[in-house]
Each structure stands twice: as C-alpha cells, then as structure tokens.
Image (cartoon, rainbow, N blue to C red):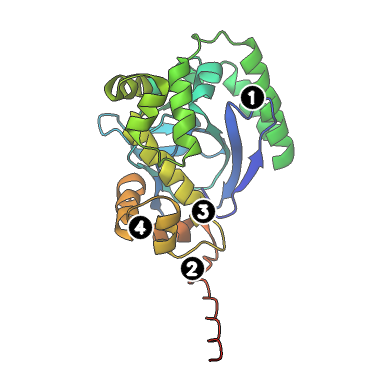
Amino acid sequence: MSDGARRWRTSARLRPLVSGIWCWSSPAGPAGTHQGVSSAHLTVVLCLDGAVDLLAAPDPRRGPGRFTASAAGLHAAPAVLATGTRQAGMQLEMTWRGARTLLGLPAGELAGDVVDLALLLPGLDTLLDRLRAEPGWAGRCALLDTALCAVAEARDRPGDPPPEVVRAWELLARSGGTARVADVAGEVGWSQRHLGERLRRETGLATKAAARVLRFERTCTLLRRPSAPPLAELAAICGYADQQHLARDFRDLAGTTALTWRAERVRPAAPIRPRPRRPSPAPSPP
C-alpha cells in the first residue's frame, strides 16, 4: 500500500463485518517487493487500476497468483507481493465474522491463502465497474459500504459461529493479545486444546497464534502514528517481554524490522525520539 493511502471508517451497519476501508493509488516505479504482514483482519483487495501480483502466499503450500480482486485469510507469516506497476484500489479490513456473512464461508477456510474474490462475492465485476465510474474516493467508499450492506442482507450465511469462539476472540482482542490462554479457556468453559482447535477452524488461527497476531496488530497501529514511542517503550506498552521479543515478532509476522516497516508506511518517516524526562524536583531545604 502506498504512502498516500487513506482509511475510511465504515458505517455502523457494516462495521462488525468490515472495520475499515483503505484507499490507495501508487504510480509506476522501480520493480520491488512488498511484505503483506499478519493481521487480525482478512485482507480483501479490489483493484481499480492494475492488479495484485502475489509472489508468495503466507502458506508456502499455496502458489503465486495475479488478481484484480482477492481475499486473504488470517495468517501468521508474511505474504510477498510485487511492486513497481501503477496501481489504485481499495482494501477492506474484514473481520473473521464478516467472512461468513459477506463471503459465505468461515474465515478458517481461507487461512494462509489468497484467492480470487470473484469465487466468493457474486456480482463482483459489476461492482468494480461502478467503483471505477465513481469520480472520488469518498463516493467510492460510500458506494462500496452500501453494496456490502446489501450483500449482508441478501446472502444466506453458513450458520453462526459458536458463542464460545466469539467470546474467546473478544477476550483476546480486548486485552490486545495479552490475555493468558488458560484464562480465556477457563472463561469460556473449554479446555485449552479444544478452544485452540475450534478457534483455528473458525478464524484460521489457534488461540496462541491469535493472541500473537492481535498484539502485533496493536503494535503496528501505534507504530504507524507520527508520535510513536521508542521501540523499547512500545514493547512494554503492548505486552512484549522486551524489545528483542518485539523484534522477533516483526521478523516472523512482517518479514522485516519494525523501523523498516514504519519507514515504508509513514512518509516522510517521523523520527522516533525518547520522550523528554520530567525534571527531578529540587531537594527540600534542610
């Protein structure tokens, strides 16, 4: 996604299914690669100009591909995308519950994979034509929001997820991924093993992996801010044992370092400086 990307907050009706919509436009440039990092949301991309060239899926058992529109499941490893061609498009932050309602299948069936969105979303070609005909991003986002709400109302869903899975995810998300797996399992009344199996089947991530990705996503959100704290402080805020622990997660989930990831998304990259210390109070007179 280019440095000119902007995020649109979805309507209250759509928000439980799609948290936000990113709009971006990138000019042609030198050939390169981009890491698609792990996220607690499914990534659904609609290209209005150009296409997505997937060089490597998060799951190494899946092959590369080229997509005008794609849906990527939750994953605990980065995807590798080709860059350098002119692109413009919209990217949905789809919740795992939104996959059932909008795509017609549990998010777990897309785990680690990237598939052609046309296989999952009826009327996609018509929707893309309407989005391309709309002159501005605000109008496109409003159009897409309305269209997805209509899909949600019209589509037959494959049942509801187990309430225990919903509750477990809520507990993990509310804690920013720092809740203990044993505590979450105890809260929903399942064994840790059973919870992990059911959570993976529904979302694509077992309990520990889900907690890790949720913590990482929160870290990325804070790191994207112009006034991001120093990495050691950020690690403490987000529940990492130390800065090295944070660095390992960036290597595993983003395929790069935290500062490189930030520099690619915050331009010009604002320097991360330690916050000024408050002056020590003057000693009391004897």
Q: Where is residue 239 in the image (x, y as percent from the top left)?
A: 40, 50
Q: How far apart are marks 3 and 4 (CA)?
A: 15 Å
Which of the numbered marks, if any, corresponds to residue 222?
Answer: 3
The answer to whether residue 5 is above or below residue 138 is below
Mark 2 or 1: the one toward you:
2
Would you say the residues marked 4 and 2 are in contact, meaning their CB atoms lie under 8 Å apart? Answer: no
Which of the numbered marks, if any, corresponds to residue 272?
Answer: 2
> Could you tell me which secondary element the residue under label 3 belongs to?
helix
Q: Which residue lies furthest to the left in this view?
A: 61
Q: Distance between the residues labelled 2 and 1?
A: 41 Å
Would you say the residues marked 1 and 4 are in contact, meaning their CB atoms lie under 8 Å apart? Answer: no
Instruction: Please indicate, yes or no, whether residue 29 appears anywhere in the rendered image.
Output: no
Residue that badge 4 annotates? 257
Residue type pointed to by label 2: Ile
Tell me which numbered mark, 2 or 3, is placed earlier along the sequence: 3
Would you say the residues marked 2 and 1 are in contact, meaning their CB atoms lie under 8 Å apart? Answer: no
Tell me which numbered mark, 3 or 4, is placed earlier along the sequence: 3
Q: Nearer the viewer, residue 165 or 47?
A: 165
Tell me which numbered mark, 3 or 1, is placed earlier along the sequence: 1
Residue type pointed to by label 1: Leu
Label 1 packing within 10 angstroms: few (<14), some (14-19), many (20+):
some
